[in-house]
Each structure stands twice: as structure tokens, then as C-alpha cells.
Amino acid sequence: MDKNNNKRKNIFTEAELAKYWQMSERTLQKWRSLGTGPVYIKIGGKVRYTKKAIRTYESNRLFISSSERYAEKGGKK
């Protein structure tokens, strides 16, 4: 079994996450510079996102309506 393939199930590149969320890589880059996107890992100049960080970010972006976040209504943070 290829060790890298096993790790890839839990780690996304910038390109993979952009494709998954159907947005540009540039948006993720901008979010990193602003500190508004998901937590990331940077090793050797390469940016990676863990599946856990992606799911945490997504959970914090849940909304009931355009004016209320899910977490404000007692949903999990």
C-alpha cells in the first residue's frame, strides 16, 4: 500500500479543496492572508488542509437563515 495514498485521504492540497468547494485557489489564498479560512498546515512552502480542519470550518459556517447561524440556535459549534 502506498503510504502517500493513505495520507491523502485525510489531507487536501489547495487545488483539491478549491475543487471540492467549487471555488478558485485564489480565494483560499486570500482567506489565508486575511486569516478567515480554514486552519492549514504549511511545510516546505506547501499548503495543506486536514479533513478535520475542513469539517470544523464547514460546521462553523452552518446557517438557519441569512441572519442566524446554526450555532446561535443551540447547534454544535
Image: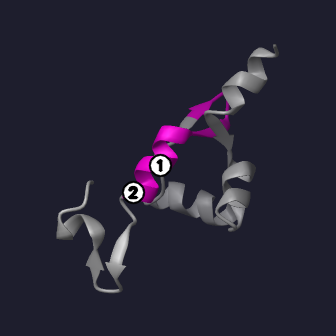
* Part of the protein shown in magenta: 42-59
- The part of the image, by quadrant, that contains residue 6 is top right
Q: Is residue 1 above or below residue 74?
A: above
At label 1, counting other C-alpha atoms closer than 10 Å, the crowd grade (few under 14, some 14-19, many 20 or more) is few
| Residue at horizontal 68 percent and vertical 68 percent from the top | 23
User: In which quadrant of the rendered image does the C terminus lie?
Assistant: bottom left
| Residue at horizontal 40 percent and vertical 65 percent from the top | 61
Task: Confirm whether the magenta stretch covers residue 54.
Answer: yes
Query: What percent of the width, then of the height, locates residue 27?
Result: 62, 66
User: In which quadrant of the rendered image does the N terminus lie?
Assistant: top right
- The part of the image, by quadrant, that contains residue 7 is top right
Furthest-bottom residue in this view: 66
Compare residues 36 and 62 and report the one nearer the observer: 62
Q: CA distance from mark 1 to mark 2?
A: 6 Å
Q: Are marks 1 and 2 in contact (CB under 8 Å)?
A: yes
Judging by the rendered image, the residue that carries numbered circle 2 is 59
